[in-house]
Amino acid sequence: GTRLDLPALLGPVAPTGPLAALDSLGELLLGAPLGPAQRDLLLAALGEGAGQDPAGLPSLVTAGLLASPAYQWR
């Protein structure tokens, strides 16, 4: 039942696309943006879903980041 207001966490500058969302949320959740190779792999895994619903983009990108090896690395 946990709820998270991702737009509020991202602040007044909302990401305009999958790449911007990935960079913003990567920095927020991982402490630094993903490297180019990891970012490209995650964008490919998110596929067309990342471009279909702009309102759901932060949730989709967050799920991808939390499932990524970069988040799970110790």
Image: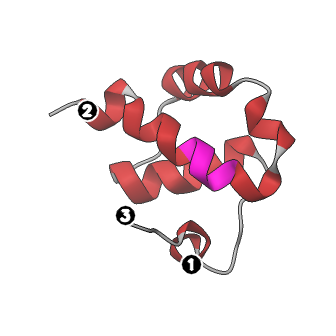
Q: Which residue is mark 1?
A: 8
| Residue 16 seen | no
Reading the chain from its start, which is encountered first: label 2 or label 1?
1
Res 59 label: none
Q: Amino acid at mark 3?
A: Gly
- Between marks 3 and 1 in the image, the one whose residue lies nearer the viewer: 3
- Horizontal and vertical percent for residue 56? 70, 53
Res 72 label: 2
Counting other residues with Cα less than 10 Å from the Cα at mark 2, is it few (<14), some (14-19), or many (20 or more)?
Answer: few
Reading the chain from its start, which is encountered first: label 3 or label 2?
3
Residue range corresponding to the magenta coloring: 57-61
Q: Which residue is mark 3?
A: 1
The single residue placed furthest to the front in the displayed view is 1
Residue nearest the viewer, comparing 7 with 13:
7
Quadrant of the image containing the N terminus? bottom left
Q: Is residue 18 magenta?
A: no
